[in-house]
Image (spheres, rainbow, N blue to C red):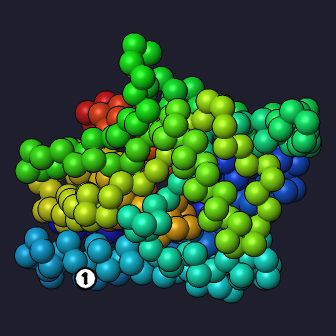
Amino acid sequence: MPSRAPGPITADCFPVPTLLLRTNHPGNQRTIRAFAHQQAMQASSLLKTLAEALPSTEDLAARSAVFTAVFEATEDWRYRIAAASPEPTGRYGRSSAERFRQPVTDDNPNLFRIGEHERLREGARWNSATRTYLGGTETPASRTMKQTGVLAAARFPTSSGAEVIQNQVNLDSGHRVPGMRLLRGAAARSAAVEMVARIRTRGRDTSHIITDGDLIYCASAKEADRTAIFRQAMDLLAHDHATEAAALTAWLQATYMIYQAPRRKRGSDAATRTFLMAAGTYLLHRPPTLLDDIDMRAIVLPQESFVAELRTVQRGRSEM
């Protein structure tokens, strides 16, 4: 494990997820970007925990347990932020805080629609006659969703009627474990119907959710597969890497794996980014570089493509 002091983690290490930037107003964007300061503070605290615990821990299983405990602490931190939100209602309000620690299960998988970028345009209006969003101006969120939709659609072979494409995660053992699923056709429409039922149960409006047409959804993998993938990610980080290049490769692979194995219904991306910054800084002696849409790219890209792309944005790497 590294012995020299890792570099400082600052808010600049955390590019705001572009799907959150549904406005072009500089002041509103600054408010959204301010969360990066909380992430930097938490990542710095996690880094200190790793630096104190790992040097005296020689057994791989014990080191893996340290990384796992730090990840769990990050999840708890994200929940506590939600529980202390000044907003009483809304997606990130106190009334939704329990969803930040509600586990993803086989009976309650994570579902998320990819596409319909028009709804993320600033000032877009819902047309009840056409059941589409009209007008508005492009935002970082709408542009990202448009690009993500193109990448997701490209995963489906044009020569077949495949409705499910499942990312495959390569483990050290040589086994391949199914990760996140991309759904199209009837499978996607079924996911949309399930989403409507869930949201109605929570007492929220579902009138703007489309359940027909050419939809694309992503869905989490089975619990046993997610558990295996997550454990592999922790083990990769826990190895005593002989070189910084080996440590970088482990961090890149672990990043993809963690995104393939979401554990909570909400807040996973923020928790994952914060954990990855702490773990990466410890292993590489400096903060790694995160993509502003790292979560979406991990969902829609195969493992090899994602790892190669993330590798290219790392600065100062001798192998580049």
- How dense is the environment of label 1, judged by Cα within 10 Å: few (below 14), some, or many (20 and up)? some
Return the residue nearer the eye: 15 or 181. Answer: 181
Q: Between 167 and 285, which is closer to the camera in this rendering?
A: 167
Relative image position of residue 107 (x, y in whole percent)? 42, 66
Q: Quadrant of residue 216?
A: top right
- Residue type at mark 1: give it: Ala
Which percent across, then down, holds residue 161?
42, 23
**Residue 266 in sight in this render:** yes
- Percent position (x, y) of residue 281? 37, 61
Task: Please identify the quarter of the rendering in which residue 81 is found.
Answer: bottom right
Residue at 63 percent across and 80 percent down: it is 97
Q: Is residue 204 left or right of residue 156?
A: right
Image mark count:
1
Q: Quadrant of the C terminus?
A: top left
Residue 71 horizontal/vertical position (percent): 37, 73
User: Residue placed farthest to the top in the image?
Assistant: 159
Decide if residue 287 is on the left or right side of residue 303: right
Q: Is residue 318 left or right of residue 199?
A: left
Q: Is residue 317 visible?
A: no
Instruction: From the viewer's side, name the closer residue of 142 and 126.
Output: 126
Q: Say above or below: 187 vs 104.
A: above
The residue beneath circle 1 is 53
Figure check: 207 above or below 79: above
Quarter occupied by the N terminus: bottom left
Nearer the observer, 320 or 98: 98
Disc 1 on helix, strand or loop? helix
Which residue lies at the image location 80% right of the left edge and 62% below the top edge? 205
Residue at (32% x, 80% y) in the render: 69
- Identified at 66% across, 57% down, the residue is 196
